[in-house]
Image: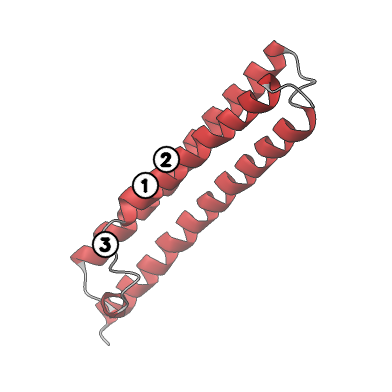
């Protein structure tokens, strides 16, 4: 393996690590929002609900976009430079970027709908 190949593997690993970190923060925010929605969503005033939903949407969008940027950088670097990752079928999945966008956007929208549903469903 050449020095360039080792550098590429290191760069890909670093980018993947940062993307996974931001994805982890997005997952933590989403879980926290779902927890708040479930346990106290009905008790919140309309203003409180709107503010917490706005802060969640802003934060989730920020961390989601950052995750997307790092995944795109990873895909572009992997496509540009040859490495041992090219021989792993999961890594060569052609729709990584689209899959990440769908996951993040859908997860965020479902979370917002969950809050709406908790607040507008009559308790049995």
Report the residue that reaches farthest toward the front: 124
Decide if residue 36 is on the left or right side of residue 115.
right
Cα gap from disc 1 to disc 3, whole angstroms: 12 Å
Q: Which mark is residue 69?
A: 1
Cα gap from disc 1 to disc 2, whole angstroms: 6 Å
Count of numbered marks = 3
Query: How many residues crowd mark 1 within 10 Å: few (<14), some (14–19), many (20+)?
Result: some
Residue beneath the point at 43% across and 64% down:
14
User: Tags 1 and 3 in contact by the CB under 8 Å rule?
Assistant: no
Snapshot quadrant of residue 121? top right
In this rendered view, identify the residue nearer to me: 116 or 89.
116
In this rendered view, identify the residue nearer to me: 122 or 42.
122
> Which residue is under mark 3?
77
Residue beneath the point at 38% across and 52% down:
70
In this rendered view, identify the residue nearer to me: 101 or 55.
101
In this rendering, the answer to whether 96 lies above or below 119 is: below
Residue beneath the point at 28% across and 56% down:
95
In this rendering, the answer to whether 11 lies above or below 19 is: below
Decide if residue 53 is on the left or right side of residue 41.
left
Q: Which mark is residue 65?
A: 2
In this rendering, the answer to whether 25 lies above or below 15 is: above
Query: Closer to us: mark 2 or mark 3?
Result: 2
In this rendered view, identify the residue nearer to me: 26 or 13.
26
Among numbered discs 2 and 3, the one appearing first in the sequence? 2
Q: x, y percentage for residue 103? A: 44, 47
User: Tags 1 and 2 in contact by the CB under 8 Å rule?
Assistant: yes
Q: x, y percentage for residue 84? A: 30, 80
In this rendering, the answer to whether 90 lies above or below 23 is: below
């Amino acid at each position: 393996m050449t020095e360039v190949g080792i550098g590429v593997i290191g760069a890909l690993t670093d980018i993947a690590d940062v993307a996974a970190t931001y994805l982890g923060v997005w997952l933590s925010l989403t879980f926290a929002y779902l927890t708040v929605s479930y346990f106290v969503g009905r008790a919140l005033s309309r203003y409180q609900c709107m503010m917490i939903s706005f802060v969640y949407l802003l934060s989730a969008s920020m961390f989601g976009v950052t995750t997307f940027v790092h995944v795109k950088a990873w895909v572009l670097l992997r496509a540009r430079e040859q490495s041992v990752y090219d021989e792993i079928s999961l890594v060569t999945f052609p729709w990584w970027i689209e899959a990440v966008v769908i996951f993040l956007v859908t997860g965020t929208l479902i979370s917002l709908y969950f809050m709406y549903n908790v607040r507008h469903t009559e308790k049995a």
